[in-house]
Image (cartoon, helix red, strand yellow):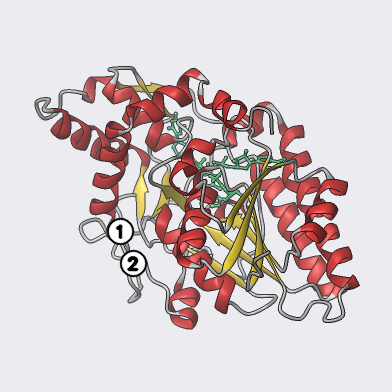
């Protein structure tokens, strides 16, 4: 049997961000064994990893992070020495309708992973030496920032931004690593709680933990309940585009592969017990991003300019809708040398083209057919 240099458990690897992280690690580190643990909820889709599913250093395990006994077994079976924890319920609108599922997976699931890792690592002669528990969190735990500059101003940063044309800030404040937690939605409250548990395992037991808080991701393989894939698909099919409230809310967007690159750098070089913010210095009002999507899809499909603007439909606002998110990722750029590799204009063009070129993926997801993929693949195993 082959001995691997590292055995890394990635949770939620069949989801949007997780699939990019798994792909990057499996390709970049053939000397590591990557164990992708995923429950395959509605958001998990093994078709996201078709290109690497037969690689020798890749293993898929269908399991629930809340299944503490199973996680304990897996820790031992695969000699896990690193965990990159992405599995979560991730959609704010769903959390407003069904908060219990969010508390279960995001809080209890994270706790089950922490405790299983602790028990296993404490049995080893070297204990926590060379181990890592890396928890992926969100900027939403910091709450919401004010829109003090609704027209946008030049931000006070000299660090690299992921947008060339539209480098604006809509307020003077930003989320820093020491910004006080102030979550508003059941989703962000559950993520905040899981972050506290991770830090408590470091402070109480000396577990080698790291937490990162990232801004909104966009790119291929995102489930089309989230703004960007949903709107690209609706524009293509001439369906209404439901803009919450006035469309003035601001989000800070980062290309998903740049998030995966940050995770790689932080997993290997980040300091134990530290927090790193990850973001693109790339703030957009929802309505402006929606107009970019309309323009890009219409151009690629050969429609006249402005053709799909009539699809914009203002609807009732999301309950407790956070106004503005804006991450300061200076610490990560300065200390670990990470910076976004892709300008937003290039990233959005790639993303729109990917969804338009992969209509089969989109149709499988919207029809629910993707959930049969796993059953077919693992039939009889
Ligand atoms: P996603 O919803 O696309 O994927 C989540 C994955 O977790 C799915 O594959 C799902 O099957 C799996 N999962 C859910 N519950 C599980 C359980 N109980 N046991 C095992 N697997 C389970 O989410 P995403 O957008 O890829 O987000 C991944 C992580 O990154 C989350 O922790 C999220 O909070 C965080 N995050 C997301 C963003 C973003 O913009 N999408 C930004 C910052 C942080
Ligand atoms: O900031 C990081 C977070 O970004 C992650 O932690 C979450 O997992 C991820 O889902 C995302 O949360 P948002 O709520 O910001 O993403 P969403 O795509 O749902 O919405 C983006 C913005 O667009 C938000 O202001 C709500 C608005 N919106 C969204 C949808 C789905 C609409 O106006 N209409 C819509 O139909």
Is 201 on the left-hand or right-hand side of 359? right
State yes or no: Cβ of the residue under disc 1 lies below 8 Å from any atom of ligand 2.
no
Q: Quadrant of the N terminus?
A: bottom right
Q: Nearer the viewer, residue 20 or 96?
A: 20
Is 358 on the left-hand or right-hand side of 43? left
| Percent coordinates x, y for residue 240 in the rendering | 34, 18
Q: Quadrant of the C terminus?
A: top right
Q: Looking at the image, which residue is at 46% across and 22% down?
A: 366
State yes or no: Cβ of the residue under disc 2 lies below 8 Å from any atom of ligand 2.
no
Q: Looking at the image, which residue is at 47% across and 26% down?
A: 365
SS under mark 2:
loop
Is 200 on the left-hand or right-hand side of 133? right
Q: Is residue 236 above or below residue 198?
A: above
* Residue 142 seen by the camera: no
Residue beneath label 2, please? 155
SS under mark 1:
loop
| Percent coordinates x, y for residue 377 in the rendering | 57, 31
Circles 1 and 2 in contact, beta carbons < 8 Å: yes
Q: Nearer the viewer, residue 82 or 216?
A: 82
Categorize mark 1 by other alpha carbons within 10 Å: few (<14), some (14-19), many (20+).
some
**Distance between the alpha carbons at the discs numbered 1 and 2:** 6 Å
Q: How many labels were placed on the picture?
A: 2
Q: Which of the marked residues, 1 or 2, is nearer the chain's N terminus?
A: 2
| Percent coordinates x, y for residue 81 in the rendering | 72, 69
| Percent coordinates x, y for residue 140 in the rendering | 58, 51
Residue beneath label 1, please? 168
């Amino acid at each position: 049997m082959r001995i691997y240099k590292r055995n890394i458990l990635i949770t939620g690897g069949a989801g949007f961000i997780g699939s990019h992280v798994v792909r990057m690690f499996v390709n970049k580190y053939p000397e590591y064994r990557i164990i992708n643990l995923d429950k395959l909820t509605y958001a998990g889709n093994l078709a996201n990893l078709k290109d690497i599913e037969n690689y020798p250093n890749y293993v898929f395990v269908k399991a629930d992070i809340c299944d503490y006994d199973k996680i304990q077994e897996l820790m031992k079976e695969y000699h896990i020495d690193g965990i990159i924890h992405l599995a979560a319920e991730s959609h704010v609108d769903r959390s407003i309708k069904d908060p219990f599922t969010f508390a279960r997976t995001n809080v209890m699931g994270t706790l089950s992973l922490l405790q299983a890792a602790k028990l296993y690592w404490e049995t080893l002669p070297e204990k926590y030496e060379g181990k890592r528990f890396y928890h992926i969190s969100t900027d939403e735990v910091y709450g919401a920032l004010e829109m003090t500059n609704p027209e946008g101003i030049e931000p006070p940063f000299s660090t690299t931004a992921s947008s060339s044309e539209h480098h604006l800030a809509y307020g003077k404040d930003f989320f820093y690593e020491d910004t006080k937690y102030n979550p508003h939605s059941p989703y962000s409250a559950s993520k905040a709680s899981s972050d506290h548990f991770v830090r408590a395992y470091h402070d109480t037991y000396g577990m080698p933990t790291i937490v990162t808080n990232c801004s909104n991701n966009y790119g291929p393989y995102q489930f089309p309940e989230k703004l960007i894939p949903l709107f690209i698909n609706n524009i293509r099919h001439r369906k209404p585009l439901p803009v919450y409230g006035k469309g003035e809310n601001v989000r800070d967007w980062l290309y998903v592969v740049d998030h995966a690159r940050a995770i790689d750098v932080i997993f290997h070089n980040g300091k134990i017990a530290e927090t790193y913010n990850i973001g693109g210095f790339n703030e957009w009002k929802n309505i402006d991003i929606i107009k970019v999507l309309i323009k890009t899809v219409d151009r690629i499909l050969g429609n006249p300019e402005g053709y799909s603007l009539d699809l914009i439909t203002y609807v009732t606002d999301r309950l407790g809708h956070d106004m503005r998110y804006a991450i300061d990722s200076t610490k990560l750029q300065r200390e670990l040398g990470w910076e976004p590799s892709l300008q937003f204009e290039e990233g959005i063009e790639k993303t729109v083209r990917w969804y338009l070129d992969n209509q089969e993926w989109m149709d499988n997801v919207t029809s629910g057919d993707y959930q049969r993929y796993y059953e077919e693949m693992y039939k009889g195993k």
